[in-house]
């Protein structure tokens, strides 16, 4: 398609020379984890290939281990240890090259942050200490022989990377990994020629860059990722002190500087969630580099909009825009900008759910906005292409939250006639309330994208319609509607009786019909006035409890939290936890952990310590708990109780319809299905996935259940590569 982009974006499409290579534009997919590594080559190749197709000028692996001494198991990194990895990663570089993009590899040696749980090797590092990030992991402090050997690992990995077809080799000194550990006084306590003065601390990195450049510099661009400020003040690297000095010292050795900030222990300061950081939040640090370097400078900062990207380049702050999350949320971001289709961009909402899956370790990455992320190979889903409708079935979707709106969008993209009904005036379901919580405004982009797309699709197919703001549909309404297939996406609600994950029962005395007890919906809907002393009962491990605590404390309430599950624990995986806890501390929110509630009376609740039942377990006969009596009961006063104890599916409509399935045939209904929170409460990403999946699989024999996906598994008895020589290759 001919370019229709406004001229102000031209700067984003100017080619740029990077060493021996030319990058066709200024869109760089920065290294980011997806759970593919080198062992799922189909996943790796298809996920990165789709971005090449979507217009990204350069696309990287996730962190790619250069040697078994750098093994991040239980998490999944790529690996370039041997010929098998070369062959598997070549599948990725081939896909990328088909679309004229460059392929980059981020060469990773984690040192003390690499737990080596699979390989059982011992990582080596600048100085010996326990990792501030990884549990119980120490490195071996390198002597000069060790230094030569590990530098050779980089060289060997660079040579293998070149053989795998990579155009850019990146010596990774971000996130407190080995090269920046040598540079940073926080990690480097040495007194020899590799420690102490700036020149000594810089020596390991400089030598490594020299050796890598000598080995592959004629064939590949050499990049270096540099956490230019550890954010520790004088204890670490500061941008205007050692940061700039290192840029000046090593500028001739690199073709590209890849600049970021922060460490690994709090890497949410780099991959900043939208709750705390706007796009371009690292620019105040990154902008120094171009003033001191003659080389191409790129950097991340969850750049979501073309306006900001162009401005950053025009201002001389960066040469190349690097994106991880925006490229996951919309792999076709560059192409949409190129074609002037800004309103088709599926903007990253900054929830960091993609990161949460990597932090948990193992599973494939998912995305709240882009349900096809991670599904490109195994399910064969393309973010922008859909199989045309296979029948002229008409489809009624009831509920326009994340799951229903996504189902309707994809079905309409396929060409089905769809009616999307919701008793609310606006699509978005529960996002409409969630996006009003402190810092979560950008989560509303999920709704906005679908709103814009559905409006366009309805105009394209005038038999489809959005039926918003009417009566809630009953089972009679659905049966008489005239649709061939029905998808129920009616969501879930917060329990009003205290039913929770600890006891699985209601809490005696709790009733959200009372004026002093309130569910999140009642608070966000403005239907409950709260008193001065608010107590939040929390047995949900994600964002609702902490968000309400922040909201209410900021409004002037005295907030106490009674928590039985770990307050905001899932937010450690989304990297929101550290600043969330700082925020709650600022607001004097009092969190009483390891505690749950036995009963509630007027104005007071009775709590107990969940560990108060004794450490000894013994059989005491039927009807007697095999532990001691819990004697930790206490009473606390409250003015208002907020109930964040758990959710339940809003599935009454589905269950009634299912009970009346004998009436389907006479109403010409072929099937009624249920998705999203109405099937079981889940995070927004999974609700969106449900909607997307059923729309792709609506013609299957039973669309309620997913069809099998391709598994990339080793099969017993199949040839294993590279036979025999495997272990030798690890040795210098
Ligand atoms: P999910 O996350 O599964 O998509 P949400 O709770 O976000 O679910 O959205 C459910 C939507 O369904 C809400 O917008 C609600 O107004 C709508 N809804 C629930 N029951 C009915 C009904 N019987 N008729 C029409 N709309 C309904
Ligand atoms: Fe952005 Fe959230 Fe998707 Fe990650 S999961 S790319 S943060 S929308």
Image (spheres, grey):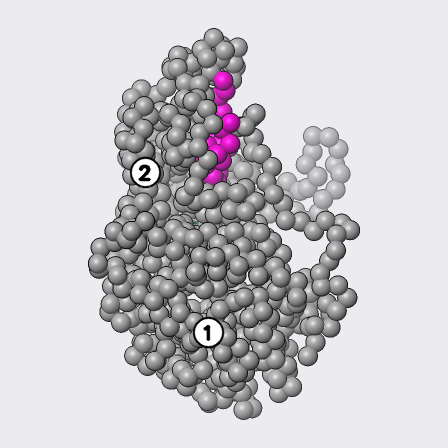
State the residue at coordinates (29%, 21%). 470
Given residues 476 and 730, the one toward you in this image is 730
Farthest residue in the front direction? 2
Q: Find disc 1 in the rendering and name its residue.
A: 221
State the residue at coordinates (33%, 58%). 303
Indicate left or right for 276 with 541 as reference.
left
Given residues 589 and 142, the one toward you in this image is 142
Report whether the residue tagged 1 is closer than 8 Å to ligand 2.
Answer: no
**How many residues crowd around disc 2 within 10 Å: few (fewer than 14), some, or many (20 or more)?**
many
Given residues 472 and 153, the one toward you in this image is 153
Would you say residue 86 is visible in this rendering?
Answer: yes
Question: Does dot 1 land on a helix, a strand or a loop?
Answer: strand
- Looking at the picture, does residue 27 appear above or below residue 646? below
Is residue 687 a member of the stretch shown in magenta? yes
Farthest residue in the bottom direction? 193
State the residue at coordinates (43%, 71%). 21
**Region in magenta:** 670-699
Estimate the x, y position of residue 482 in percent, counting from the top left: 39, 15
Report whether the residue tagged 2 is closer than 8 Å to ligand 2.
Answer: no
Given residues 622 and 17, the one toward you in this image is 17
């Amino acid at each position: 398609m001919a370019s229709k982009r406004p001229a102000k974006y031209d700067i984003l499409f100017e080619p740029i020379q990077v060493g021996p290579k030319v990058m066709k534009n200024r869109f760089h997919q920065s290294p980011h984890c997806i759970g593919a590594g080198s062992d799922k080559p189909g996943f790796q190749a298809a996920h990165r290939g789709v971005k090449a197709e979507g217009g990204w000028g350069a696309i990287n692996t996730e962190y790619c281990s250069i040697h078994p001494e750098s093994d991040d198991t239980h998490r999944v990194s790529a690996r370039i240890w041997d010929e098998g990895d070369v062959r598997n990663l070549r599948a990725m570089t081939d896909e990328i090259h088909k679309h004229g993009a460059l392929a980059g590899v981020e060469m990773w040696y984690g040192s003390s942050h690499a737990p080596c749980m699979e390989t059982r090797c011992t990582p080596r590092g600048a100085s010996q200490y326990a990792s501030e990030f990884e549990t119980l992991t120490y490195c071996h402090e390198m002597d000069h022989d060790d230094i030569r050997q590990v530098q050779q690992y980089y060289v060997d990995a660079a040579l293998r990377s070149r053989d795998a077809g990579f155009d850019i080799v990146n010596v990774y000194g971000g996130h407190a990994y080995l090269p920046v550990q040598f540079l940073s006084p926080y990690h480097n306590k040495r007194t020899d020629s590799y420690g102490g003065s700036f020149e000594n601390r810089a020596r390991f990195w400089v030598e490594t860059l020299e050796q890598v450049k000598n080995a592959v510099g004629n064939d590949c661009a050499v990049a270096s990722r540099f956490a230019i400020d550890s954010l520790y003040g004088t204890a670490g690297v500061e941008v205007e002190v050692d940061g700039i000095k290192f840029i000046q010292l090593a500028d001739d050795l690199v073709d590209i500087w890849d600049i970021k900030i922060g460490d690994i222990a709090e890497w949410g300061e780099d991959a900043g969630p939208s709750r705390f950081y706007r796009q371009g939040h690292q620019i105040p640090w990154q902008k120094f580099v171009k003033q001191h370097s003659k080389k191409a400078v790129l950097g991340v900062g969850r750049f979501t909009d073309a306006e900001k990207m162009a401005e950053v380049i025009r201002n001389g702050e960066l040469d190349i825009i690097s994106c991880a999350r925006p490229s996951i949320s919309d792999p076709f971001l560059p192409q949409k900008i190129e074609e002037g289709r800004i309103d088709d961009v599926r903007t990253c909402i900054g929830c960091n759910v993609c990161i949460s899956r990597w932090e948990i370790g193992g599973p494939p990455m998912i995305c709240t906005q882009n349900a096809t992320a991670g599904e490109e190979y195994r399910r064969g889903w393309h973010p922008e292409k859909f199989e045309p409708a296979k029948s002229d079935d008409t489809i009624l979707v009831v509920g326009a939250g994340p799951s229903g709106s996504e189902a309707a969008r994809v079905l309409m993209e396929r060409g089905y006639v769809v009616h999307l009904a919701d008793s609310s005036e606006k699509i978005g379901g529960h996002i409409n309330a969630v996006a009003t919580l402190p810092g979560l405004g950008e989560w509303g982009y999920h709704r906005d994208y679908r709103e814009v797309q559905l409006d366009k699709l309805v105009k394209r197919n005038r038999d489809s319609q959005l039926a918003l703001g009417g009566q809630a549909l009953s089972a009679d309404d659905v049966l008489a509607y005239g649709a061939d297939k029905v998808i129920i996406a009616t969501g879930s609600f917060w329990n009003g009786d205290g039913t929770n994950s600890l006891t699985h029962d209601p809490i005696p005395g709790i009733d959200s019909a009372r004026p002093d007890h309130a569910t999140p919906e009642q608070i966000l809907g403005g239907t409950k006035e709260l008193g001065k002393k608010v107590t939040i009962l929390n047995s949900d491990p994600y964002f609702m409890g902490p968000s309400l605590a922040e909201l209410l404390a900021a409004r002037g309430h005295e907030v106490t939290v009674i928590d039985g599950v770990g307050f905001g624990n899932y937010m450690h995986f989304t990297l929101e936890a550290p600043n969330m806890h700082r925020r709650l501390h600022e607001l004097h929110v009092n969190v009483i952990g390891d505690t749950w509630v036995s009963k509630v009376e007027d104005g007071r609740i009775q709590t107990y310590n969940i560990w108060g039942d004794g450490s000894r377990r013994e059989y005491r006969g039927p009807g007697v708990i095999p532990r001691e009596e819990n004697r930790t009961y206490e009473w606390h006063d409250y003015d208002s109780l907020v109930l964040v104890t758990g959710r339940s599916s809003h599935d009454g409509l589905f269950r009634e319809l299912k009970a009346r399935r004998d009436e389907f045939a006479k109403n010409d209904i072929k099937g009624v299905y249920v998705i999203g929170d109405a099937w079981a409460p889940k995070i927004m990403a999974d609700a969106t996935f449900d909607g997307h999946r059923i729309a792709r699989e609506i013609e299957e024999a039973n669309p309620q259940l997913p069809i099998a996906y391709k598994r990339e598994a080793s099969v017993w008895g199949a040839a294993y590569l590279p036979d025999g020589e495997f272990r030798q290759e690890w040795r210098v």
